[in-house]
Amino acid sequence: MQLVVMAAVLLLVRTGHSCSLGCHPANVSIDVESCGIIESVHTTICVGQCYHKDPVYIAHDDWPEQKICNGDWSYEVKHIKGCPGGVTYPVARDCNCAPCNEGSTDCGHFLEYTPNCLPF
């Protein structure tokens, strides 16, 4: 269930087309489901982009370290009236730019066009 809620949070982040430089927490509402009942919960996610500058030439064994917007995550439980168990959802705390962990994250290049993020 935690994976489904985290995927929903990440989808919310991707659907937002506004660009925000710098990594920071943002308030969002997500839907959670238990016993066929859907309720909205308010939570915090990490949003924004971390500064990264590609060098003119990159050797195959000398890729620059990529940083991503991430943070410390905790989980809270929402109890839906009439359901025996609670639904666990993520809450981001203390967002920052950190090295990309290839073991748990796709660290490929960001290929979307982001005109709002250009420095000029």
Image (tube, rainbow, N blue to C red):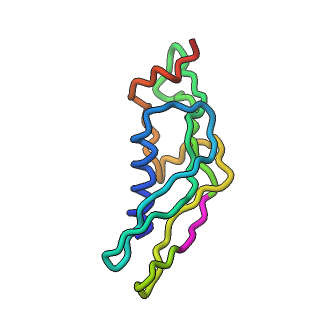
Viewer-side residue, 93 vs 110: 93
Quadrant containing the C terminus in the rendered view: top right
Tell me the residue at 46%/48% (across/down): 105
Foreground of the two, 3 or 104: 3
Q: Is residue 37 left or right of residue 29?
A: left
Residue 117: image location, x then y, percent: 53, 23
Q: Residue 101, percent across and down?
A: 53, 48
In the depicted structure, whether residue 96 falls above or below residue 85 = above
Q: Give residue 114's position: percent from left, percent from top.
A: 45, 24
Residue 75 colored magenta? yes
Q: Residue furthest bottom?
A: 84
The quarter holding residue 4 reads: bottom left
Identify the residue at image location x=49%, y=56%: 29
Task: Please give left or right for residue 52 compared with residue 110 in the image.
Answer: right
- Magenta-highlighted stretch: main secondary structure? strand
- Front residue of 24/58: it is 24
Up/down of 58 relative to 99, above or below: above
Locate the N terminus and report the quarter of the image it occupies. Answer: bottom left
Q: Residue furthest left?
A: 36
Q: Which residues are magenta?
A: 73-77
The number of numbered badges drawn on the structure is 0
Q: Quadrant of residue 111?
A: top left
Q: Spot the residue most to the right.
A: 94
